[in-house]
Amino acid sequence: MEKEKLKIGIYELTGCAGDALLIVDCEEELMNIFKAADIESFLMAKSDNRNGELDVALVEGSVSTEKEKEELLDIRRRSKVVVAIGNCACVGGIQAAFLDKKDWEKNFKKVYGTIAFTHTKPAQSKPIDAYIRVDHYLPGCPIGKEQFLSTFARMVGGNPPELYRFPVCVECKWHENDCLLNKDIPCLGPLTLAGCGSVCPDHNIPCFGCWGPTEEANLTSEYHLLLDKGFDLEMIKKRMANYSGTRIAEFFAQFRKEKR
Amino acid sequence: MRILKLQKNCLFPFLEAISKEAELWAPVAKGDKFAFDRVADFSRIAMNATRTIIPAKKIMVPANFNMFHFTEKGYKEDLSHVTDRILFGVHACDIHGLLTLDKIFTQVYPDPYYLEPRKRTMILGLSCWPDEHCFCKSTHTHIVEEGYDLFFTNLESCFLVWIGSSRGDDLIRLVPDLFDENLTEKDIKTYIQWQAERDNAFKTEIQFVRLPDLMELNYRAPFWEELGAACLACGSCTMVCPTCNCYNVMDKQFLGEKPGQRIRHWDSCTLPEYSEVAGGENFREKKFQRLKLWYTHKLQAYVSKYGKPSCVGCGRCLVTCPVQINVKTVAAALEGQEPEAFWKNLAKEATR
């Protein structure tokens, strides 16, 4: 008897759709992906989408409207397991990197002026775990092919994903790279989740943090280290905030507390 | 143990002859640092290399490799990454590093994934000259009495070649005419003088004999938390350490019919998940606790088990840690000094 296939849904909220696109781009494995599971919903790849019960929901993007929040709550209700895929879903992405509500309101006004929103109410962008329980986080901007495929294969095999929790530096040392920070290049490797295969440092390009911060990212130490090396305060802040989403707020709170 | 003489211009012909027996690996330039790599063109070999970024342990236990393939029916061991190798240009500290790994991987629980490449790798040591970060004289690992097949001392006029094993002797016998058995009195004098000059060239000295007691006495010292506050938890110190050997295993599955792989990769006790157990509890939740564990292991616990520290004085942590948490600055803190280090400055900044 053939095993019953997992029912999987792939959803996109606010983001560039880069994670969904990456899945479509797994060309050689695409047949295997669709063979291994029943893909119930995947707006980018198919038109006959159903909104029924799911074993696993993969959710890309941050929540930036009331409508998306409702959609997300509905996905959670229908799914046994929810996996946040990509930096926006995991930490809020670039669009969430405002420190407080006032900053966001100011920026929002600057962009949209006084346009009236009729179909939904906009909200400050947040990662999906601001609203629902998330079982697993698959980081990346976008997610990596290899990590996505092995995660997908593990889940299809009935196992939870096994993802790196350590920073880029570990993979960077596996590849025997000379530390860029030690050459006074502003690398965010120590703060950033591994899994990318340290592709940028492998090519002498500093890590920009696109896989988001690790659970223990020592932003304070790195911040002072970069200041010590003579980098501009605003540049450091911007670079750190870029992919840290709402996590950057924790850092500035921590930093302000220390300065007091 | 025999000692032979090899003229400088005979080295490449010798390497040429032995590289027919196995893959020849040696330190080559990588940026302004060095790395062990397979060499066919011997002119790439960095004869005056300082430490490589990653020590020779990467040959015995690669950073990341497949242990076996598995399906629902069973598993099949994978040692396809292991080949016959000759590792040339291994410095004394790294030979001691391998001897330390031998104790860990071959005694209580012999590890086949270590034993196989270890057995199939010949070690051809090469003398070196200390830079400002080397302190192997302090750990007594600047000389080797075992752990090599051949050892080349690089004198100005020639090499003196120590034969450390019968396998090493076999290599010499491939081209015996390249070697001279008759060392002159002048050769011996030159060697003694070289050794004296080399021993005087060390700029970093650490009193290791005092450190086990100082670790014990400083167990609750406030500087540990200062270290923890600055530590980036990047794991680099453990990756580059010749005696760090911890690893994790992960099962990698694939779609379709492809069998799964059990991947073994270097792990680090300075990372939070290392001391985490089922249920999410963590025995060493804070960074300073994990750093203290690492230094306890290197400077104290290993001494009580094996009679010497598990630090070989290579200086890799000194040149790698971006916030200067390393054996030198930690030893200084243990001695009650204020080391010149980023972590110390950060602590001062925080209390300002």
Image (cartoon, rainbow, N blue to C red):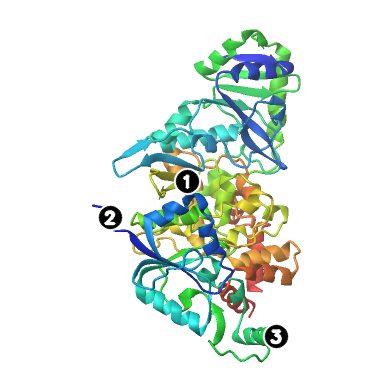
Q: For mark 1, give the secondary structure.
A: strand
| Residue under the image location 48 percent in, 74 percent down | A128
Q: Do the residues labelled 1 and 3 touch (CB within 8 Å)?
A: no
> Mark 1 vs mark 2: same chain?
no
Query: Mark 3, residues whose alpha carbon is within 10 Å: few (<14), some, or many (≥20)?
Result: few
The image shows residue B193, relative to residue A21, as above or below, that is above
Residue B85, image x and y in percent? 54, 26
Specify the farthest residue to the front.
A48
Image quadrant in which you'd find residue B90 = top right
Question: Can you tell which mark lies on residue B265?
Answer: 1
Chain containing mark 1 = B
Q: Name the residue under label 3.
A: A110
Residues at marks 3 and 2, CA–CA distance in whole angstroms: 54 Å
Residue A112, image x and y in percent? 66, 86
Please, what is the three-letter code of the amino acid marked with disc 2? Lys
> Mark 3 vs mark 2: same chain?
yes
- Sequence order check, earlier mark of 3 and 2: 2
Please, what is the three-letter code of the amino acid marked with disc 3? Lys
Q: Name the residue under label 2.
A: A3
Chain containing mark 2 = A
| Residue under the image location 67 percent in, 74 percent down | B352
Q: For mark 2, give the secondary structure.
A: loop
The image shows residue B85, relative to residue A1, as above or below, that is above
